[in-house]
Amino acid sequence: MTATHIRHPAVAGRFYPHDAEALRQEVRAYLSQTPLQTPLRALGCIVPHAGYMYSGHVAGAVFSRLEIPQLCLVLCPNHTGVGRALAIVSEGAWLTPLGNVAIDSAFAAALKQRCPLLQEDPAAHRSEHAAEVELPFLQTCQPQLRFVPIALGTGQFDALEQLGDAVADVIAVQNDPVLIVASSDMNHYESDAITRVKDRSAIEPILTLDARTLYDVVTQQHVSMCGFGPAVAMLTAATKLGATSAELVKYATSGDISGDRDTVVGYAGIVID
């Protein structure tokens, strides 16, 4: 992958508007739904990645709560099954309707050096939506945005913990702040009532910054939280960097929008600082 490589959007026009002005207006509307507070300089966050009509209001509540730094690490699940288990892209830029977002090659290189499990793999990201949908929010909040994407196709705790430890070590020596964005929806395709119970069981260990218990709850209680890997890695890194608290900014299900309570997806917006 050369420095001039541009990844084109995979889900513009489906998950969010393809037209730049329509997208900008929609993102700003979601960001403005939450009462203004002093922005937090957080270490990490968990943000949903569904179509904006369903989860955009939750994502907007999180990003409007934060002071978005110029460098973000975006961890996402691998929904497509394509590529390496821990797939990073280290060069080039990603295009959204709002413009290009450059990848921070130096930060990516440091991550790969510190965590040999990471492997260069643009193919894992080519059709994956879970990192892409976060970018218009981050771009709107931080026009000077640079980022590094990592797609996680592994559910092994040891690998997720190793990644989190490495992320913390690399961030600790940066001169400027870095936000770790864990892109994840919560429980999938069960009733609203069941989903809310399952999601609460997963949210509770996140709020106590307990990555191992989150992993155990998701894997043992069959919570279909697609981005539990990114969340585990983010929590591991944030706690190593000194995180002391977590806040559930907003929770919702797709049923709140569609009116269908029989089959829903849960969305949690959480800030770690």
Image (cartoon, rainbow, N blue to C red):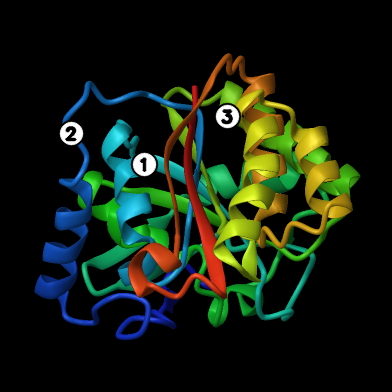
Question: Mark 2 is on which residue type?
Answer: Pro
Which of the two labelled residues, at mark 1 and mark 2, occupies the earlier sequence position? 2
- Kindly identify the residue that appears in the image at 33 percent across and 33 percent down: 66
Asked which secondary structure carries label 2, the reply is: loop
Name the residue nearer the viewer: 109 or 117: 117
Which residue is under mark 2?
A: 35
Residue 200 location, quadrant: top right
Q: Is residue 82 left or right of residue 13?
A: right
Q: Position of residue 116 (x, y in %)?
A: 82, 49
Which of the two labelled residues, at mark 3 and mark 1, occupies the earlier sequence position? 1
Which residue is under mark 3?
A: 171
Q: Is residue 223 left or right of residue 23?
A: right
Residue 216 location, quadrant: top right
**Circle 2 residues within 10 Å: few <14, some 14–19, many ≥20:** few
Which residue is under mark 1?
A: 62
Q: Is residue 1 visible?
A: no
Q: Position of residue 208 (x, y in %)?
A: 66, 23
Question: Mark 1 is on which residue type?
Answer: Val
Total number of numbered discs in the rendering = 3
